[in-house]
Image (cartoon, grey):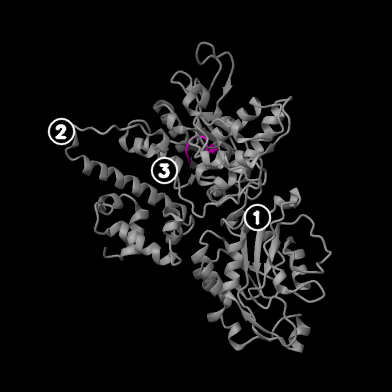
Amino acid sequence: MTSSDHNSVPNDTTESATSSTLPRILVIDDMFGRQVQGRPNRERANLCGMYGLRDVTGDEPFPSDEEVVNPTAEAVFFRGQQPLCATVGDSVENDLGATIAFVRKGWHTDANSGPTWALVLLDLCFYTGAVTPDSNNAFAGMPVGRAGDDDARSYFGLTILKRLREEFPELPVVILSSKQREEVSLLFTEAGALGFISRTDSAGRSLLGEYLWRHGLTPDPSGTVVGTSLRLLLALRKARREAEGRQNVLIRGERGTGKDLLAQYLNRYGTLDNERRPFVTVDCGALLPSIWKSELLGHKRGAYTGADSDRQGLVVQANGGDLFLDEIGNMIPEAQEGLLRVIETREVVSVGATSGRVVDVRFIAATNKSIEKAAEAGTEFLPDLLDRLNFTKTIWLPPLRERRSDIPLLVERFVREAESSCEVAMNRQIRPNAMNALLAYDWPGNIRQLQSVVRDAVNSHRDVEYLVAGHLHFGIDIPAEAENNAADVIPPIISPAVDLPPATEPVAEQPERPLSTDPKNLNGSFDRLVAGFHEQIADVVEACLSAYSDPLTGKVNYTGAYRLAVSPSEQSSNVSGDAKRWFRMLFVGKNGLVAPLPAETVAKRPLLMDARRWACGSGS
């Protein structure tokens, strides 16, 4: 078997259930990634044992028979050089093009419907040149090396890292090296790496686990939050990061996107130790003026007529854990004021009590409303409460139409749940024309609507072995192109390559605004529309910048923010250059009908101010 037959990204759908729950990392290293003739790569096997990696590369005709117990992750190894398998007399050369192409195969693209990279472990120093008898005896297939290979100013690993940051800004990269950290720390930090692991560190396995938790693009291991799309994985990673320190968190997203499930995810995986903590849900819209105090704060016996016993309020029930404020935009002003006092004082005073009780509660709020506008107007939401809940910790949950690659997983889950809940329902296969119809729909009601459509299809057709397009009822006609597609194989699903936070207000819920033809009403209407348009543009751009703002340093990845905001079809191969031009145009403008963002709109948003300085210079 030749070396060209190896190093393909495994997409085997028959992998075990245990394997499918493990994150998959890519190790780019000239020693661990090389192939050895006639035997396993012993250095790779030792690394897998030390770091708890299950090797799924599939490039060795005689793989190691050592089994890793309780693996931390699956690992695919790539040399980053040619040839992949070298012998005495061969010349080994670095291959940047092949390396980037290999990364692309396992990334979120339309060409890959299998597992994707959760994290990259990247070596710094790659040795090149001739494979001599002495170098081959030391490490089979390794070259003797050239003078410049060990020069920190020209590390091939840094060249790879810079290209990865340009093309895959969301892909987390950690350095795996035998070099001393203090010697290379500034180099790999400036190039965009997120951490460093020494090859000889006895705590390397634990450190890798921490990096996967903090930086990895990993799905929910419990399977409660279903999906492996890039947008969802970015939201889950942000949730883990934002949960550190138990600060309050605000979850934003359209109706039916699963904000309650993300809140439960925060409760389960908000800390490395995964300690079980109370999780209490508050239906904010159900807190009526007559009952909100008793519900939230509790009451003492005899506090009012009908109070026959002490009642522990929901805030106290969540002590030591999380209180989930579902759709907080629906909370009445009186309850908002009471909640604000609890958040500020961390003390609960029950109705009828003479003293308070100190509580340790993290408040996780969720809404699909534009509570910022309500807070700014001072009408329906308290600005101080918004500040306490947000605290810069906002997570955007993407709508289903922007994570279509997760639809097959969700459909499979909902079909089996519907069959289980209906005793007489037969198990069924999901036909391609049904899946194509589900993929073609835009889902204004998101996951909740998808679940309802699937459940109705199963319940209405219990006695058949297939789910077909004709069983689905969306409230509108099924798209003709999906209905007519009777292919036997479902085409590869395109994973979205960008991560644009949803609009502040769900488009489907906007009231219709009929155009008035009365000249008196049209006077100045264009200027008013443009002003509103600028505010919406500023909101979305600010959200994109926030999504790529480092929570520790505040540094913004402007290229990543640009990739979120702009359609992939509008981007060229020079994404970093496009980003700067696009931001400059946003603030300075170009000849056209609509002017650039007004200075007063930008001045209200620190992230936009920083972006303007970056794109246009400090004097702009």
Residue type at mark 3?
A: Ala
* Sequence order check, earlier mark of 3 and 2: 3
Image position of 282 with respect to 411: above or below: above
* Quadrant assignment for the N terminus: bottom right
Give whichever of 378, 420 is nearer the camera. 420
Q: Dot 1 surroundings within 10 Å: few (below 14), some, or many (20 or more)? A: many
Q: In which quarter of the image is residue 208?
A: bottom right
Residue type at mark 1?
A: Pro
Is residue 44 magenta-colored? no
The residue where tag 2 is placed is 520
Q: Residue placed at 45% from the left, 21% from the top?
A: 288
Dominant secondary-structure state across the stretch colored magenta: loop
Q: Which portion, as a residue range, is magenta?
A: 252-259
Image coordinates of residue 168 in percent, x first then y, are 52, 62
The residue where tag 3 is placed is 503
User: How far apart are labels 3 and 2 at the CA level?
Assistant: 31 Å
Residue type at mark 2?
A: Lys
Can you name the residue that lies furthest to the right here?
A: 65
Q: What element carries label 3?
A: loop
Q: Are marks 3 and 2 in contact (CB under 8 Å)?
A: no
Image coordinates of residue 462 in percent, x first then y, are 69, 26
Q: What element carries label 1?
A: loop
Q: In which quarter of the image is residue 38?
A: bottom right
* Sequence order check, earlier mark of 1 and 3: 1
- In the image, which disc is placed on residue 115? 1
Q: In this view, does 134 lie to the left or right of 535?
A: right
